[in-house]
Amino acid sequence: MPQMKGSLIVVGTGIRSVGQLTTESIAWIERADKVFYIVSEPIAESLIQRLNSTAESLQKLYVQGKPRLETYKDIADTILASVRGGNRTCAAFYGHPGVFVLPSHEAVRQARSEGYVARMLPGISAEDCLFADLGVDPASSGCQAYEATDFVMHHRQLDPSCSVILWQIGVVGEWTYQQTGYRNSGLPLLIEKLTRYYRPDHGVFVYEAAVLPECEPTIRPAPLCHLPYVPLSSASTLYIPPAHAAIPDRDMYQRLGLAL
């Protein structure tokens, strides 16, 4: 298939764009014929607009009551229309552009299937910030991570001997965009499922990364049973520390030549 004229580069602005937007991402934003972006705060928006005068926000595609999957399709279609028009297109997303950003993956996949050059650059995600702010090393005990609604809806199995991260606990079971907040009626189901693995008094943390310079992250510790009383937003992440140490496999210890 011949290489097409248009191209796509997808970048992330990080959680705090000031300091977390990489020099490589900045260069791609500056040189693009057309820039689209979705960011979470005005400093990032102002920075992108200064870097490239063609910059256009796609936040307008989020409409009250509109299914989020429909919005994601519209975002990908808008980006692809620019690529198909022959433009060197850059799409900038809040955080890591490949973490909880469905339209970025779809736009890259579709562009490549049509013969365009398309790639994604890594960025700093909320998970990276969580590890730093909570002092968690995912290698020390292992780490599982699930989107909260996905965890509730499927037969996922947790290992209480490792760290667990559940994303988007403030929008469990919510399928549409809401400007004024979410009812989060699915939260009791999430807690019900978690109590299969943890005592009600097991300590957890509700975490939100800081998005502005010199601001502190939001870290709310609570026992699992008190989670319904902790303020939540669509940006809330649940971190669950290990409940106990991992159980040694004595046979494997011996086969590795190690002593317990």
Image (spheres, rainbow, N blue to C red):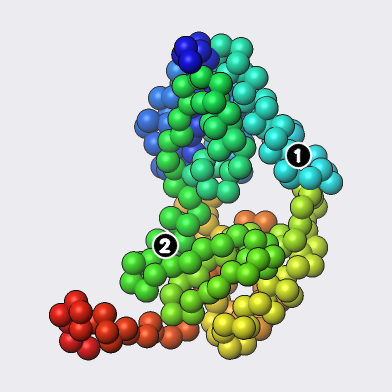
Q: Position of residue 140 (x, y in %)?
A: 33, 71
Residue toward you, 159 or 201? 159
Q: Amino acid at mark 1?
A: Glu
Between 20 and 28, the one lying in front of the other is 28
Left/right of residue 258 with respect to residue 228 in the rendered view: left
Q: Residue at x 65, y 66 (%)?
A: 154
In the depicted structure, whether residue 69 falls above or below residue 52: below
Total labels: the figure holds: 2
Q: Quadrant of the C terminus?
A: bottom left
**Residue 166 placement, left or right of 256:** right
In this rendering, the answer to whether 108 lies above or below 138 is above
Please tell me which residue is depicted at 84% across the width and 46% down the height of the picture: 65
Q: Nearer the viewer, residue 3 or 147?
A: 3
Secondary structure at numbered mark 2: helix
Q: Is residue 95 above or below residue 230?
A: above
Report the residue at 50% width, 32% height from top: 10
Q: CA distance from mark 1 to mark 2?
A: 32 Å
Q: Which residue is mark 2?
A: 131
Near-viewer residue (188 or 150)? 150
Three-letter code, disc 2 = Phe
Asked if residue 99 can be seen in this view, the reply is: yes
Residue 21 point in image, percent of width and height? 44, 38
Marked residue nearer the N-terminal end (1 or 2):
1
Q: Residue at x 43, y 36 (%)?
A: 121
Q: Which residue is mark 1?
A: 70
Neighbours of disc 2 within 10 Å: few (<14), some (14-19), many (20+) = few
How far across and down, in percent of the image, does residue 160 sit?
Answer: 49, 79
Q: Is residue 23 left or right of residue 108?
A: left
